[in-house]
Image (spheres, rainbow, N blue to C red):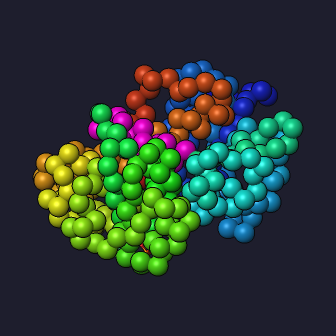
Amino acid sequence: MTITGATAIAGIAGSPVTHSMSPVLHNAWLAAAGIDGAYVPFAVPAAGFTAFATGLRGGVVRGINVTIPFKEEALALADTADDLALLSGAANLLTFAPDGTIAARNTDGPGMLAALALQAPGFDPAAGPAVILGAGGAARGAAAALVLAGAPQVRLVNRTRAKAAALADALGGKVAVFDEGPAALERANLIVNATSLGLGGGPGPELDFAAAPETAVVMDMVYKPLDTRFLQAARASGRRTVDGLEMLIRQAVPSFEAFFGQAPAADVDVRALALKFLGAAT
Ligand code: NAP
């Protein structure tokens, strides 16, 4: 990559940010398109995000992706926000306009829906209830996206019930809290693991998939390892599965478009690149 006097800059802000795969994806897309741009990591101190992002007003940096723990703060400092960021209470994308304004978006939810469309062709989020295991940041984004995509009901199952109840309150009437068990899976159209269970190869959530319809699609947001025990069990029960890496890649696509004004080239095998990076990072 050659950095010139005209290089357009975007990046990702997080604490920590060292393990982020976003620079690998975006710089591969930039190189393939021959765009004079660079996507860099910004390791922002935990108490310094608002000062950092406010300092970018004016558009010297085109925009940033935002990761843990700054997604709520990112939404709070923006001047405008899309529906998904507002409903989920979090933004993972900020763009800086020349007039000094900051626009916030949430592309995590669309990333999840795009991954479902790709790996479970024909999946319709509106066709039945969705079950989300977890009530943290990832569950929040997923639940908001599913509500906006027309899911008739979103069921939250979480170790800490009070956290699920608070999330259901924030998201409105279609979101309900369920206890773990067959009732949560009855008529389920989608089951998503949005807990950190299974990360690093440990045991995932244990579900009796037989309580869900055979047509239910099962997704794991955990992508390290790629083929989690949760997905293996779902597949063994005959359910279609979707992995977390595709979601990670798909949430980056609208960010790239927002920063550099064009869609990433479809012929760059970023999935293979990401798998190589994940292998190297283990
Ligand atoms: P978070 O805000 O820290 O939430 C963690 C969730 O996991 C909470 O619901 C927590 O339950 C639950 N949990 C943790 N340990 C548990 C255990 N031993 N037993 C039962 N539940 C447990 O994290 P997050 O940001 O939502 O991320 C969750 C996962 O999604 C992570 O693995 C992350 O890597 C992944 N993720 C993937 C993508 C992607 O693009 N593929 C995007 C975002 C996140 P309590 O409320 O009871 O603590």
Whether 171 is drawn above or below 158: the answer is above
In the image, what residue occupies the spot 68% across and 55% down? 75
From the viewer's perspective, is 121 left or right of 22? left
The total number of labels drawn is 0
Q: Is residue 216 visible?
A: yes
- Residue 197: horizontal and vertical position, in percent? 34, 67
Q: Is residue 220 visible?
A: no
- Viewport quadrant of the N terminus: top right
The residue nearer to you, when weighing 101 against 202, is 101
The residue nearer to you, when weighing 94 against 64, is 94
From the viewer's perspective, is 172 left or right of 64? left
In the image, what residue occupies the spot 74% across and 47% down? 80
Which corner quadrant of the figure contains ligand 1?
bottom left
The residue nearer to you, when weighing 201 against 84, is 84
The residue nearer to you, when weighing 164 against 65, is 164
- Viewport quadrant of the C terminus: bottom left
- Residue 103: horizontal and vertical position, in percent? 73, 44
In the image, what residue occupies the spot 72% across and 59% down? 76
From the viewer's perspective, is 165 left or right of 80? left
- Residue 156: horizontal and vertical position, in percent? 39, 65
Helix, strand or loop: magenta stretch:
helix
Q: Where on the picture, by quarter, is residue 8?
A: top right
- Residue 99: horizontal and vertical position, in percent? 87, 38
In the image, what residue occupies the spot 56% across and 35% down? 254
Q: Does the magenta-highlighted stretch encompass residue 153?
A: no
Q: Does the magenta-highlighted stretch encompass residue 114?
A: yes
Q: Which residues are magenta?
A: 107-120
